[in-house]
C-alpha cells in the first residue's frame, strides 16, 4: 500500500525544502514539491520528514540485567527518539561470546523489539572459532574492550588481537573497540587514591589513557588492514590520532564515533551530577568537547552513537568506587 507524507519539510540537495514523500513497498519512490495522492496520506504540515536513525552502540541489558532495562523499554525509547535501528553490545549475562549465544539472543529479541536490530559478539581472547562460525550467520561486528570497563574484562594482548584482526580482514566484519589503556588507569587510580574532588573520574580515565590505547590499536591495524572502529571517542588527543590514521595506507578502514554526552557535557558536569555522568571513557574537560565538535563539523568523525547504558538510580547513588559507569 502506498503511503504519502504530504506537505512536510525534507532535507534535499543541501537545504530544507517543502516536499511530499511517497513510500511504496517499504521504499521511497517519489519526492515532490506538490501533494502526492496515495491510498494512505499523512499531513506533515509544520513537521520535518527525517529518515530513521541508526544507533550502532546501545546496551539494552538483556539477557541477565533486565532490572536495569529490557528490549521493550529500550527499543521504545529509541523509537521515540527517531531511531529505527540499533546494534546491541555483548556485555550481558551471559555475554554474547558463542554462536549459540548470538542465535539465542536473536530469537529472544525478535519477540519484543519495536525497532530493527543487530548484535555484536564479544571477544575474550579465546573465542575466535565461535566468531568465525557466526560470520556465516550474519555477524557484522565484534566488540573488544581493550581496557576493562563496567562488567567487562580488558583484552589488550596484541598477539591475540592480531589474530582477531586477521580474521576480521578475511571475513569482512568490523572490530569495534573500547580504547582505554589499563596501565594508565591503574597508575592514575593509585595516584589519586583518597581524593574526593568531583571530577576524579576524568582524571583517572584521562585523555592519555585513551590516546595510548588508540595508538596501539592503530599501529596494529596499519599492519593488517582490517576494518577498525573506535567507539565513543572522547578526547582531542584521541581524535588527532584517528585523523592521522585516516590519511595513511589503510585509513579508509578506520572509523570513529562520538556520543551525545561527550558532545554536550564536559568535566564541569561532575560537580552537579556526580555519578550520574560517570561513564567510560570519561566526560573530559571543555577543550576536549570543543575539539570533538570541530571534528564532527569537519567530517573527521564518522557517526554519532549514543552508548546508551542505563543503570538503576540505586546503583548510581552508591559511593564513587562502587557506582557503575554508563549514561542512558
Image: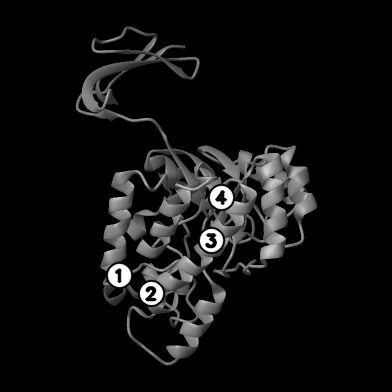
Q: Quadrant of the C terminus?
A: bottom left
The answer to whether residue 73 shows anywhere in this view is no
The answer to whether residue 209 shows anywhere in this view is yes
Residue 47's spot in the image, x, y percent?
24, 29
- Mark 1 and mark 4: Cα distance apart in space: 26 Å
- Mark 3 and mark 2: Cα distance apart in space: 16 Å
Q: How is the image coloured?
A: one colour
Secondary structure found at label 2: helix
Q: Which residue is mark 2?
A: 202
> In this rendering, would 261 be left or right of 8?
right
Determine the image quadrant of residue 139. Answer: top right
The residue closer to the viewer here, 282 or 240, is: 240
Please tell me whether residue 165 is drawn above or below residue 19 in the rendered image.
below
Circles 1 and 4 in contact, beta carbons < 8 Å: no
- Mark 1 and mark 3: Cα distance apart in space: 20 Å
> Going 50% across and 78% down the picture, which residue do you hit?
185
Earlier residue among tags 1 and 3:
3
Q: Crowding at label 3, few (<14), some or many (≥20) Cα neighbours within 10 Å?
A: many
Q: Crowding at label 4, few (<14), some or many (≥20) Cα neighbours within 10 Å?
A: many
> Going 78% across and 44% down the picture, which residue do you hit?
133
- Mark 2 and mark 1: Cα distance apart in space: 8 Å
Please tell me whether residue 236 is drawn above or below residue 167 in the rendered image.
below
Earlier residue among tags 1 and 4:
4
- Mark 4 and mark 3: Cα distance apart in space: 11 Å
Earlier residue among tags 3 and 2:
3
Q: Which residue is mark 1?
A: 285
> Going 56% across and 40% down the picture, which residue do you hit?
117
Q: Which mark is residue 178?
A: 3
> Going 62% across and 49% down the picture, which residue do you hit?
120
Earlier residue among tags 4 and 3:
3
- Mark 2 and mark 4: Cα distance apart in space: 25 Å
Q: Which mark is residue 228?
A: 4
Amino acid at each position: 500500500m502506498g503511503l504519502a507524507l504530504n506537505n512536510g519539510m525534507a532535507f534535499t540537495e543541501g537545504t530544507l525544502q517543502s516536499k511530499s514523500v511517497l513510500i511504496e513497498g517499504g521504499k521511497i519512490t517519489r519526492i515532490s514539491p506538490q501533494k502526492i495522492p496515495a491510498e494512505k496520506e499523512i499531513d506533515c504540515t509544520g513537521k520535518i520528514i527525517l529518515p530513521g536513525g541508526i544507533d550502532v552502540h546501545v546496551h539494552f541489558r538483556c539477557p541477565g540485567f533486565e532490572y536495569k532495562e529490557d528490549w521493550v523499554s529500550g527499543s521504545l525509547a529509541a523509537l521515540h527518539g527517531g531511531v529505527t535501528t540499533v546494534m546491541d553490545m555483548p556485555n550481558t549475562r551471559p555475554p554474547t561470546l558463542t554462536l549459540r549465544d548470538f542465535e539465542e539472543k536473536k530469537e529472544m529479541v525478535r519477540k519484543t523489539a519495536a525497532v530493527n536490530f543487530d548484535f555484536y559478539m564479544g571477544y575474550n581472547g579465546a573465542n575466535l572459532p565461535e566468531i568465525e562460525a557466526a560470520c556465516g550467520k550474519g555477524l557484522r561486528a565484534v566488540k573488544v574492550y581493550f581496557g576493562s570497563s563496567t562488567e567487562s574484562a580488558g583484552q589488550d594482548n596484541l598477539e591475540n588481537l592480531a589474530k582477531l584482526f586477521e580474521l576480521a580482514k578475511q571475513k569482512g566484519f568490523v572490530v569495534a573497540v573500547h580504547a582505554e589503556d589499563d596501565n594508565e588507569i591503574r597508575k592514575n587510580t593509585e595516584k589519586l587514591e583518597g581524593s574526593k574532588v568531583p571530577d576524579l573520574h576524568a582524571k583517572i580515565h584521562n585523555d592519555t589513557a585513551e590516546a595510548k590505547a588508540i595508538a596501539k590499536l592503530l599501529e596494529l591495524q596499519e599492519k593488517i588492514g582490517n576494518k577498525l572502529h573506535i567507539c565513543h571517542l572522547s578526547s582531542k588527543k584521541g581524535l588527532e590520532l584517528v585523523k592521522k590514521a585516516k590519511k595513511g595506507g589503510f585509513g579508509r578502514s578506520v572509523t570513529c564515533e562520538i556520543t551525545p554526552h561527550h558532545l554536550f557535557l564536559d568535566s564541569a558536569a561532575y560537580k552537579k551530577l556526580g555519578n550520574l555522568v560517570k561513564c567510560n571513557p570519561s566526560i573530559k574537560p571543555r577543550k576536549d568537547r570543543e575539539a570533538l565538535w570541530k571534528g564532527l563539523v569537519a567530517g573527521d568523525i564518522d557517526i554519532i552513537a549514543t552508548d546508551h547504558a542505563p543503570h538503576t538510580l540505586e546503583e548510581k547513588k552508591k559511593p564513587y568506587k562502587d557506582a557503575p559507569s554508563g549514561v542512558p
